[in-house]
Amino acid sequence: MRLDAVGLEVMAHAFASVAEEMGLVLVHSALSPNIRERRDASAALFGADGEMIAQAAHIPVHLGALADAVAAVRTLDPQPGEFFILNDPYAGGSHLPDLTLIGAIEIDGQLGGYSVVRAHHSDVGGMTPGSMPAGARELYQEGFIIPPTRLTSDVERLLLANVRTPATRRGDLAAQRAAVERGAQGLSALARRHGWVVLREAAHELLDYAERRAKALLARLPAGPMTAVDCLEGDGVVDEELEIRVKITIVDGMFRADFTGTRDAAPGNVNCPIAVTRSAVLFVVRTLLPDDVPMNGGVSRAIAVTAPPGCLVNARPPSAVAAGNVETSQCFARSRPAAVSYPPRGRGR
């Protein structure tokens, strides 16, 4: 199957509408103001191969890291209909208050994809209420760590025994589960309408299309290398400047960000797991693309991020990370390559 421009537009909006509906179910069902009013939550659909098909217009640092979470769950041999939970920053999470629920979607008796929701919970244990202690030196001090795990009543009971507001956490988890289920229902409805084979091929075409558009537009930027240096002013434990270095090169439409030279992980909680670093770079690239480029795993194919293991932006356990995706990741978006003029919008192939 080969979709024309109209077909690409229709299917892109069809998938995205499912993700948007997931988000609406979550924010309208959650109990906490953190999710219900502040909307610190994100939703996306993934294919069975682990690539993002569509996302809602939610939190960039969440969405860019969800692929790592799905990849971690896929190592557990998920079966259709199963639910998984995680918050481990070193297994696809961002920081511990962000709980991710992943549902393996059943289509025609097979694994058809994944429905994914991430939401910031107001407490997941740790040394201080809110689970983002400024003086933390280890991940263990920040909260209850959940590696990719099948979600059962026993796992939920264990989690709720380690938080300060279990009733609210239970309600927010139920809202996340409802949102994940709505995503599965939405994808199933699209499969019934279009046929599963047609739908799966349409998803692949959208990914390929986004990759082509992203690489073609990135190729218009200066090839580089372009370098930048920025510093964090301390981390809550030390007052010294924490240097971040990056070198950007663009070759054949590939946006490569190399953080070699960035200082080692900080003693405090401003460290980033590599998933958060990739999310921030992905967000920068997204700002360089026209709005009509669909945001899915195809755009991620145009990005390569490297960072020395154990540095500030590729931390290793048990480095604390609570502020990594709310402070450190912001450094990556303070500058961007020279502006580029694009042709009039349209879904040219």
Image (cartoon, grey):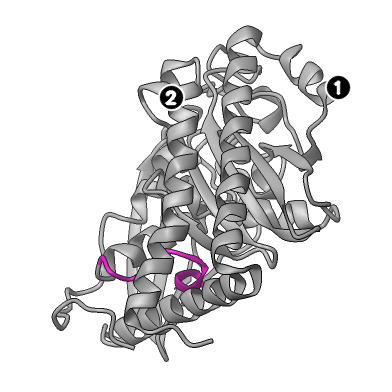
Residue 294 is covered by the magenta coloring: yes
Q: Where is residue 149 in the image (x, y as percent from the top left)?
A: 80, 39
Foreground residue among 22 and 150: 22
Disc 2 residue type (three-letter): His
Q: Which residue is drawn at 76% across and 11% down?
A: 161
Task: Please rate how many residues cluster around mark 2, counting C-alpha atoms within 10 Å: few if below 14, some from 14 to 19, many from 20.
Answer: some
Q: Distance between the residues labelled 1 and 2?
A: 26 Å
**Residue drawn at 43 percent across, 59 percent down:** 14
Residue 288 % position (x, y): 27, 69
Q: Where is residue 11 in the image (x, y as percent from the top left)?
A: 43, 67
262 and 105: which one is in front? 105
Q: Residue at x 33, y 81 (%)?
A: 5
Of residues 298 and 258, the one drawn nearer to the viewer in this rendering: 298
Query: Residue 257 sits in which quadrant?
Result: bottom left
Secondary structure at numbered mark 2: helix
Image quadrant containing the C terminus: bottom left
- Per the image, the residue denoted by label 1 is 154
| 178 with respect to 33 (left or right) | right
First reached walking from the N terminus: tag 1 or tag 2 = 2
- Residue at left offset 35%, top offset 70%: 9
Q: In this picture, is 110 found above or below 166? A: below
Instruction: Name the mark nearer the viewer: 1 or 2.
Output: 2
The relative height of residue 141 versus residue 230 in the rendered view (above or below) is: above
Which amino acid, mark 1?
Answer: Asp
User: Magenta part mainly helix, strand or loop?
Assistant: loop
Sort mark 1 into few (<14), some (14-19) or many (20+) by Cα contacts within 10 Å. few
Q: Name the residue under label 2.
A: 28
Magenta residues, start to end = 291-301
